[in-house]
Amino acid sequence: MTGVQTCALPICEEVARIAAKNINREIDKLKKQFDASEIEYTIMAALSIAMENHINIQKLNNNINKNQINNINNKINEFFEK
């Protein structure tokens, strides 16, 4: 491995730890609601988190688009104020 590859390892490990905590937290919630096998809990948790991530990405993209529109509006207003 190169230095660049090895320096990313701690970041990947941290991301994996956070993901595992999120999945375990989601599984704990699901166990209170459903009677299922461990694999079913894991699948439901992964799907739930994936859907939540998808929604968050959409919200982020909407905010980026709003910011771009606001920047364009500001430039137009600045142009006409001159």
Image (spheres, rainbow, N blue to C red):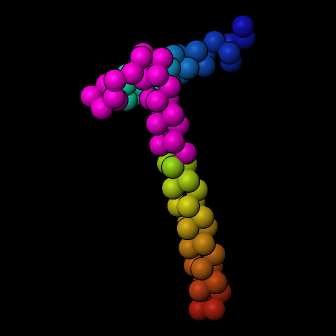
| Residue 57 image position (x, y, % from top left) | 55, 48
Name which residue lies at 56% across and 73% down.
70
Q: Is residue 34 one of those drawn in magenta?
A: yes
Position of 43 relative to 56 (above/below): above
Quarter of the rendering containing residue 67: bottom right
Position of 28 relative to 69 (above/below): above
| Residue 7 image position (x, y, % from top left) | 60, 16
Which quadrant, please, contains the N terminus? top right
Q: Is residue 57 visible?
A: yes
Name which residue lies at 51% across and 34% down.
47
Residue that extends furthest to the top in the rendered view of this protein? 1
Q: Is residue 48 one of those drawn in magenta?
A: yes
Residue range corresponding to the magenta coloring: 28-54
Position of 77 relative to 40 (above/below): below
Name which residue lies at 46% across and 30% down.
44
Residue that extends furthest to the front in the rendered view of this protein? 35
Name which residue lies at 47% across and 43% down.
52
Magenta span main SS: helix
Front-lying residue, 43 or 72? 43
Front-lying residue, 80 or 39? 39
From the viewer's perspective, tell me whether residue 69 is left or right of residue 36. Answer: right
| Residue 82 image position (x, y, % from top left) | 62, 91
Residue that extends furthest to the bottom in the rendered view of this protein? 81
Quarter of the rendering containing residue 64: bottom right
| Residue 38 image position (x, y, % from top left) | 42, 15
